[in-house]
Image: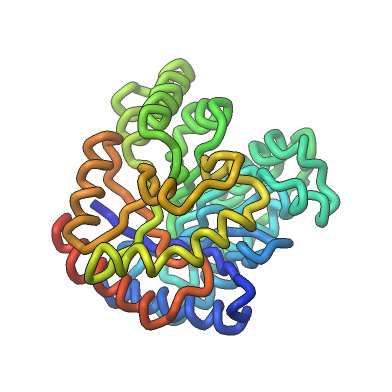
């Protein structure tokens, strides 16, 4: 199995932006040292629970202080950006990191983010689809390329730098609606799953992905292999005892879900829930290292997933407790799956 970390730059009222950024960078360096396979950055702006408006900048900083982890976005909200600028910025990250970029993309779901950039959120699906096509074409081209779409018209042009990985870095699509899954299947682009999505719903959406891919003309074996390669975001709290793991997470997690503008993307209920609800859901791995390992095995058996993005810090967690959590996972959980 593969394991990565998740970083959203949440800033609850008991901490500061400076401390948050420094804590996240410290966790990224630690993940690289502990044997995690990657680190993933979430783009959000206009809210305290997500303050990373341009993940490419954070990934460039991560590229400079790590040696081996893959560097990804989970996800970049591409309709908020110019497609050529995105292609160039993330290609530069790929060059700076020695070919370690993984580009996860999504169409966005928060009106506040679209409103502050003056973009109509009702256009997010067609804009998203066009931008994905443009980035892939720009990266794969060995010379000038052009594009004619509903929203973007690009005359013959070159994009520099081109990514180091050829024909382009791996791309991932945020799993959302059935329509998104079917479109991803037709493109044969793998997906990323939200933490609280019921496993039976995840399996049905995987099947929709496969069926759309096959109907579009992809071999079924390729479609199923790609569908099974998904990354699964999960909330992870590890400590020396179960009680310490519960205590470690409560304040930050409950603040995060109270602040969340839209719970849909994380598949959370619309109404606020008690802490025990989240702990007892399938979206959380918590407890001692052995307990967490057992939960991971159960999840993998139910979903077929072999890739977990571990969300350790929902904002403002004690740096020493966070370091301990990462070390316990890296030193006592990961080796059970390698």
Residue 134 percent location from the top left of the image = 64, 44
Residue lying at 77% horizontally and 46% vertically, measured from the top left: 155
Number of on-image labels: 0
Q: Nearer the viewer, residue 191 or 144?
A: 191
Q: Is residue 326 above or below residue 303?
A: below
Q: Is residue 117 left or right of residue 260?
A: right
Residues 239 and 31: in front is 239
What residue is shown at x 46% (from left), y 61% (from top)?
A: 40
Q: What x and y, as percent, mark residue 118?
A: 85, 51
What colour scheme does the image use? rainbow
Quadrant into which the C terminus falls: bottom left
The front one of 319 and 241 is 241
Residue 144 in view (yes/no): no
Residue 55 in the figure: left or right of residue 281? right
Residue at the image position 35 percent from the left and 78 percent from the top: 323
Locate residue 2, reporting x and y percent: 28, 55
The image position of residue 255, as x and y in percent, is: 57, 62
Q: Is residue 26 visible?
A: yes
Farthest top residue in view: 215
Residue 136, picture quadrant: top right
Task: Decide: is 321 above or below 310.
Answer: below
Left or right for 171, reference 248: right
Q: Residue furthest right?
A: 118
Q: Residue at x 48, y 75 (%)?
A: 24
């Amino acid at each position: 199995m593969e394991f990565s970390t998740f970083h959203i730059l949440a800033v609850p009222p008991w901490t500061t932006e400076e401390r948050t950024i420094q804590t996240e960078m410290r966790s990224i360096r630690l993940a690289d040292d502990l044997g995690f396979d990657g680190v993933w950055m979430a783009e959000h702006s206009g809210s305290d629970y997500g303050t990373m408006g341009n993940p490419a900048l954070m990934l460039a900083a991560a590229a400079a202080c790590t040696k081996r982890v893959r560097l990804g976005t989970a996800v970049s909200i591409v309709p908020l950006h110019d497609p050529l600028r995105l292609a160039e910025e993330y290609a530069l990250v790929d060059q700076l990191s020695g070919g370690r970029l993984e580009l996860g993309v999504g169409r966005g779901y928060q009106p506040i983010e679209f409103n502050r950039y003056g973009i109509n959120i009702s256009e997010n699906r067609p804009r998203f689809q066009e931008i994905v096509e443009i980035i892939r074409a720009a990266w794969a081209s060995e010379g000038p390329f052009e594009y004619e779409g509903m929203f973007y018209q690009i005359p013959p042009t070159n994009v520099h730098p081109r990514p180091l990985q050829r024909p382009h870095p791996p791309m991932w699509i945020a799993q959302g609606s059935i329509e998104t899954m079917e479109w991803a299947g037709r493109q044969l682009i793998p997906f990323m799953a939200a933490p609280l999505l019921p496993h039976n719903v995840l399996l049905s959406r995987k099947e929709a992905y496969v069926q759309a891919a096959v109907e579009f003309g992809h071999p079924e074996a390729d479609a199923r292999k790609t569908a099974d390669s998904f990354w699964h975001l999960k909330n992870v709290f590890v400590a020396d005892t179960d009680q310490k793991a519960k205590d470690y997470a409560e304040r930050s997690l409950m603040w995060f879900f109270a602040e969340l503008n839209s719970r849909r993307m994380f598949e959370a209920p619309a109404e606020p829930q008690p802490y025990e609800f989240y702990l007892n859901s399938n979206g959380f791995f918590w407890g001692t290292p052995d307990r967490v390992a057992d939960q991971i095995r159960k999840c993998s058996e139910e979903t077929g997933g072999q890739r977990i993005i571990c969300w350790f810090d929902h904002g403002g967690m004690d740096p020493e407790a966070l370091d301990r959590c990462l070390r316990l996972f890296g030193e006592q959980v990961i080796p059970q799956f390698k």
